Amino acid sequence: MKRSITFLFFILSSLIINAQEIISPNGKIKVILNLSDKNAVVNTLSFKALYKIENKFVEVLPDSKLGINRADEQFTDNLNFVSASKPVSIHDKYKMVCGKRQLCENSGTEKTFSFQNSNQQPMNIVFRVYNDGVAFRYVFPNHLDSQVAIINEATTYVLPYKTSCWMQPFNLAYEDFYPLGKTGLDIDKYQEWGFPALYKVNDQPVWGLISEANITANNCAAKLSNLKNTNQYQVTYPSARDNFQQTGVKTTLPWNSQWHTLIIGKLSDIVGSTLISDVSDPSQLKDTEWIKPGAVSWIYWANNHGSKDYKKVVEYVDLAVEMNWPYVLIDWEWDVMSNGGNITDAVNYAKSKGIKPLMWYNSGTIWLDPTPNDRLLTAEKRAKEFSWLNKIGVYGIKVDFFAGDQQDMMNYYIDILKDAAKYHLLVNFHGATVPRGWSRTYPNLMTTEAVYGAEWYNNNEVLTDKAAAHNTTLPFTRNVIGSMDYTPVTFSDSQHPHITSYAHELALSVVFESGFQHFADKPSAYESLPPEPKDFLKHVPVAWDDTRLIDGYPGEKVIIARKKGDKWYIAGINGKNVPQTLLVKFDFIDKGNYSCQLIKDGKDGKSFSSEIIKVKKGDTLKIECLPGGGFVGSINK
């Protein structure tokens, strides 16, 4: 009997050592860290994530490898498990200047796991299991003043064979589609992928969105690669193979990686999640009253050119006045402006009309030469330029053409944000990496492009046929992780036509979230709108107090409700090339009687139909949409 008890104790002890669990405060998400091996030496360190459905946990992420390597030490195999901390409760409540929600709140459980490699060098992995997902990062806790090189990670997300996924083939500007694919089947053409990556758990109503957050000056940004195994997506740093001179990370110790994030839940949980900003560093700015989101009139799209024509710039200032938009963006070539005035004249004209001017800059890349170029590359140049912008009365900058995700480029982004804040300048990044939580740390970052947006109507004919499905995919992918400068709401045609309906285009003002919402069409297109859609665009907010997904599926349809103050806005778009009935369930409003100003497809794609309807909580509204059609509504109590 005694031997049996001893043997049972040994088995239980092994189980305690070999697996560690972390559970979210709401009990819905669980992470199991696999430490299995003899004598607490871990040959292969891995974790898996589970989600509770009807009192049963289902696997969202199978066992997925962990580990990281420096040039001087490796922390992937034969690790000695030292200890696991007691669970720590995480509860964060903070305000955002812009985004899907002004007041953000999330709770999580944190545990730190300590290891040593074969040379007795320490490495920690910090796991947080939040109510809507998982975040983890690597930490080298020891102090070392000399520089070390972090060269790669073993971190690999394993997705089962034939998992439905929506992933963007990687390119430096993050401007591509998120096509539906099946793991193991659709990998012949592309084998490197940009964040975020959306997937659906097979045969379960559960989704996962993989990304990363809280990039600092001591990190590079990463991508996913399944070059080694078609179902295994490894976190991959910029490398010499990408033609970058700087690869990996150079740093002193202590050091921590960015947070690796996995949002988990229903599609509504994915869309509503603020996990990316939840794990990012809080802002150190004491005063943010000068940071004002807003709508912007934008000159480039309709003209396929910049702002060297003073009289054209004046037209867009007048458009901003007409449409009640607070900003005008003076795009590239303003340094060679002529035809009646120069840049100072244009800025003064905008200010005389009560419009706040923003100005474009080339980040300084040598492979693209639109001017002005090379005015921001050093702290001294930024100080000179930003001081001048303050003097003439400019409120923000758009910086374009960044050259990759390597560490020195992350430093450049951060330096621009910090220096711009000193001069109370708002920032928009174009030709840039996807958001990774900087909007919380540096709230003067209003938006980032990193999307295959309306600008592509100028470049080739592909978007014409793909726009409707693409637009219904972005709310579940790119726009989840941060503000997205798609430059929407175009009714006329630029170089290539659009076949989405006018109501679809109008709906993008609500479906897409961006702290600067650049309305891209020409002045005549907005000025000639019927009264109802025109008035809607005059007053639609760009920063929100709440965001709810009402219904949707990537590439097929999306219905989103957003709240500002005591007013709700709803918008839906049809991603299919056939008519579709969209159902709006009014479960998101409080009890009481409401009126809804509804603007939807007219008889054809180039007309609107408007009506005022009465709604109350619990009602369901059926809205018929044309192929590639849509609707918007504003709801008042």
Image (spheres, helix red, strand yellow):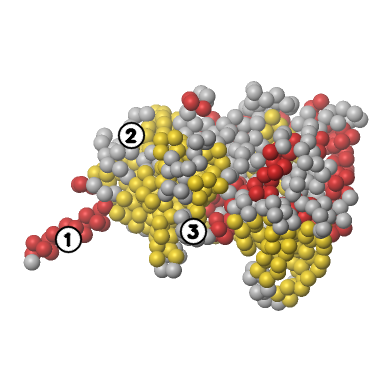
Q: Position of residue 320 (x, y in %)?
A: 83, 46
Q: Nearer the viewer, mark 1 or mark 3?
A: 3
Q: Position of residue 28 (x, y in %)?
A: 44, 63
Label pair 1/3, CB-CB below 8 angstroms: no
Q: Amino acid at mark 2?
A: Gln
Horizontally, residue 285 falls left or right of residue 386, namely left
Check disc 2 and report the residue beneath it: 74
Q: Residue at x 46, y 48 (%)?
A: 162
Check disc 3 and report the residue beneath it: 206
Q: Nearer the viewer, mark 2 or mark 3?
A: 3
Horizontally, residue 482 falls left or right of residue 497, namely left
Secondary structure state at the residue bearing disc 1: helix
Q: Quadrant of the N terminus?
A: bottom left
Q: Nearer the viewer, residue 90 or 65?
A: 65
Pick whichever of labels 1 and 3 is earlier in the sequence: 1
Residue 387 in view here: no
Q: Quadrant of the C terminus?
A: bottom right
Q: Residue at x 49, y 31 (%)?
A: 238
Pick whichever of labels 2 and 3 is earlier in the sequence: 2
Q: In this view, which residue lies farthest toward the front?
A: 578
Check disc 1 and report the residue beneath it: 9
Q: Position of residue 405 (x, y in %)?
A: 54, 34
Q: Amino acid at mark 1?
A: Phe
Q: Residue at x 16, y 61 (%)?
A: 8
